[in-house]
Image (cartoon, rainbow, N blue to C red):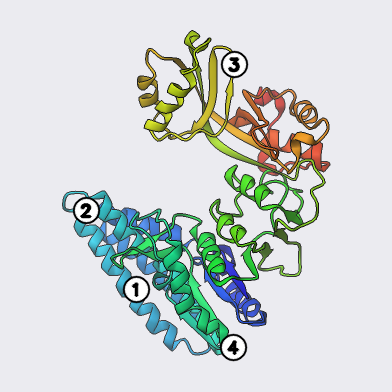
Amino acid sequence: MIVMKFGGSSLASAARIQKVALLVAQCDPAPCVVLSAMGDTTNQLVDVAEMAGRGEAEPATTKLDTIFAAANAAAAELLQDAGAATTGLKQLHSDASLFVRAFVRDADQTADPARSAQVADALLAHGERIATLLLTEHLRELGKQVMAVDARDVILTDNSYGKAKPKKGPILQRTHQNIGPHLAHGVIVVTQGYIGSAPDGSTTTLGRGGSDWSAALLCAALGGDELQIWTDVEGILTCDPRTVSNAQPIAHLTPEEAAELAAFGARVLHPATIRPVVDKGIPITVRHTMQPAGGSTRIDKHGPDAAGGITALASRGPITVLTMTSRRMLDASGYLARLFEVFGELGIPIDLVTTAEVSVACTVEADAPIERLVTALDGHAHVEITTDCAIVAAIGDGLQHTERVLERACRALHPIKPRMVSFGGNSRNLSFVVRSIEQDAALQRLHEEFFGTTRETPAAHTTLEEIN
């Protein structure tokens, strides 16, 4: 059994939904299909929520009308008989309008962040619900047996609106009740990614990129043979093609490599996607919806033996570098413990860390509460803050045992001077912290060194003289 997840770019138009339907129809046995919202619908719904949250009733309503007008136009183009879809879209439009009015009403009263987050989730869920309705009706016109299952009846979560945490035990039970029997009888199941329901039945969302997570949870619960992530690239590439135009497809990644790439900025997979299926030993493939016969990437711990060396490059930024200095660090066994205790108390996660005789340097997200940290460390350490930095990471199993990899990387980066270098925390990550303005150039230089000649993208024509 296969779970097929299609992203927003795969569903951006009636023509693309037709392509998705053909891929689903050709899958044997009948798959479970998990959908994102069409194109940039989620972004548009976020705009609606923000307008309504400011009490801007008319602009919010107009924007919502535009979203549903586009959905109706897609239905008219996609379906020979759009009657059922039109009726369904009308009901969804009415439901969404209720949440917009609730937002506006709440904006006129005392602001309640928890209430706003709950209403926002209910509104944002309509993007995935629209996509599910359109694909289901089109599959029926193709003569396929298909069942639309509301994800809120299966993906049970806590009530952390906007970033809900799934409950694996209840999801397993609901999946076997609501999805498994249909698949067993050869019926295609279409459901939504990204959304679920809280204990009180209200709608929740898993956070941006959560459709991949939904698909992985369902695939693990079903004991699937493969999780297919269908997107707009031929698998995972050696670098972001927006920065390195001739980035190369990667045929195979280990789950550990994929997780590192996701954590350090690769945009294909949600960082939480890997775990549910990896725990079950289920492979993941990343495929191009419009070029299904093209390249793809398989993520599987049972793949070919690692050859060593760098598999791919990723970057994340902006980040901030903190350098904390105190002579108390000399012969003070509790210094580091107290230092990181403060980070824990303030809920500030650390990405990279290096230590010297009297100082510690680490990287944190750009929006971390730096002022509170500096105040908390007053008298314990002097904090030097460097903003507008980025992490450039080289990922590959067995890097520590790859001859001259650090030497080659440092030589390739010259004359870029990294502020930090992290190597040895695990066997598959070599990371450099550079200035944000140097991020693209660093990726291009490393890619040229380890993967061959790199052609810069038009947006990346920055000379080293300008960088330095």
SS at mark 1? helix
Instruction: Give the Cα distance between marks 3 and 1.
Output: 60 Å
Which residue is located at x 58 percent, y 33 percent?
A: 390
From this viewpoint, is residue 240 visible?
A: yes
Q: Going from the N terminus, do you reach mark 4 or mark 3 first?
A: 4
SS at mark 2? helix
In the image, what residue type sits under mark 2?
A: Ala
SS at mark 4? loop
The nearer-to-camera label among 3 and 2 is 3
Instruction: Give the Cα distance between marks 4 and 2.
Output: 45 Å
In the image, what residue type sits under mark 4?
A: Leu
Residue 252: percent from left, percent from top? 75, 55
Instruction: Give the Cα distance between marks 3 and 2.
Output: 51 Å
Residue 32 against residue 210 in the figure, above or below: below
The nearer-to-camera label among 4 and 1 is 4
Looking at the image, residue 377 sits to the left or right of residue 312; the answer is: left
Q: Which residue is mark 1?
A: 93
Q: Which residue is mark 2?
A: 107
Front residue (pair 255, 407): 255
Q: Which residue is mark 4?
A: 142
